[in-house]
């Protein structure tokens, strides 16, 4: 199965790297944009299967960006996950839009990506590795290689811990 093309639109470099690392680890193809206008240019070339966007972006907000993207042929049903600190705004499309608090857990992001890609795109999610237990030192080498180290709050990860997974 081809990997899902995900466009991450966020003006925070740390969030860009961390979300990208989680998605790449899960087998997705990821492109990054820092604002809505850059994302629209990139989306024209990429034709993303899924967008993960900060609701508050420089130059344009995440909802306006998605409205513009969805007005283009071939993008009318592109699903989006919006990262926000606020409750979901009125007038969003619940069939295509999901909202995730910026202080999300890695498992929440993976679950939403799986849900949207299976529901909207008809793709079967890849099987997930089991997260490491709190005391991973008790695992044998064979056991630890079958488990994912990506579990927990995104804020709790150092970039180096994500990059070595």
Image (spheres, rainbow, N blue to C red):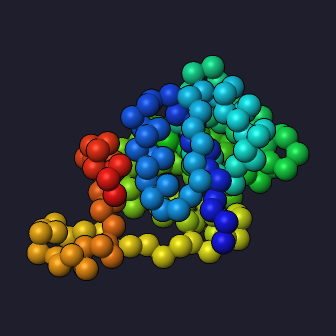
Furthest toward the top, the residue is 59
Q: 14 or 160, which is in the foreground? A: 160
Q: Is residue 27 visible?
A: yes
Whole-percent x, y for residue 144 in the image? 25, 73
Q: Is residue 79 visible?
A: no
- In the picture, residue 13 is in which quadrant? top left
Q: 143 or 105, which is in the foreground? A: 143
Number of labels in the image equals 0
> Measured along the vertical axis of the image, is residue 92 above or below residue 65?
below
The residue that appears at 25% across and 80% down in the rendered structure is 142
Whole-percent x, y for residue 145 in the image? 30, 73
Q: Is residue 52 left or right of residue 151?
A: right
The residue that appears at 57% across and 72% down in the rendered structure is 125
The residue that appears at 63% across and 19% down in the rendered structure is 59
Give the quarter of the figure containing the C terminus: bottom left
> Measured along the vertical axis of the image, is residue 72 above or below residue 136?
above
Give the quarter of the figure containing the N terminus: bottom right
Whole-percent x, y for residue 151 in the image? 31, 60
């Amino acid at each position: 199965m081809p990997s899902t093309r995900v466009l991450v639109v966020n003006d925070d470099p740390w969030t860009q790297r961390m979300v990208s690392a989680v998605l790449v680890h899960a087998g997705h193809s990821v492109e990054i944009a820092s604002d809505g206008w850059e994302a629209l240019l990139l989306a024209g070339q990429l034709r993303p299967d899924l967008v993960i966007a900060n609701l508050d972006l420089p130059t344009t907000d995440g909802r306006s960006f998605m409205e513009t993207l969805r007005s283009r042929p071939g993008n009318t049903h592109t699903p989006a996950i919006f990262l926000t600190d606020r409750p979901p705004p009125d007038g969003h499309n619940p069939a295509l839009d999901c909202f995730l608090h910026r202080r999300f857990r890695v498992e929440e992001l993976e679950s939403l990506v799986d849900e949207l890609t299976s529901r909207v795109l008809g793709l079967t999610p890849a099987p997930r590795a089991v997260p490491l237990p709190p005391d991973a030192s008790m695992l044998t080498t064979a056991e630890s290689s079958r488990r994912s180290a990506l579990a927990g709050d995104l804020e709790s990860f150092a970039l180096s811990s994500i990059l070595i997974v």
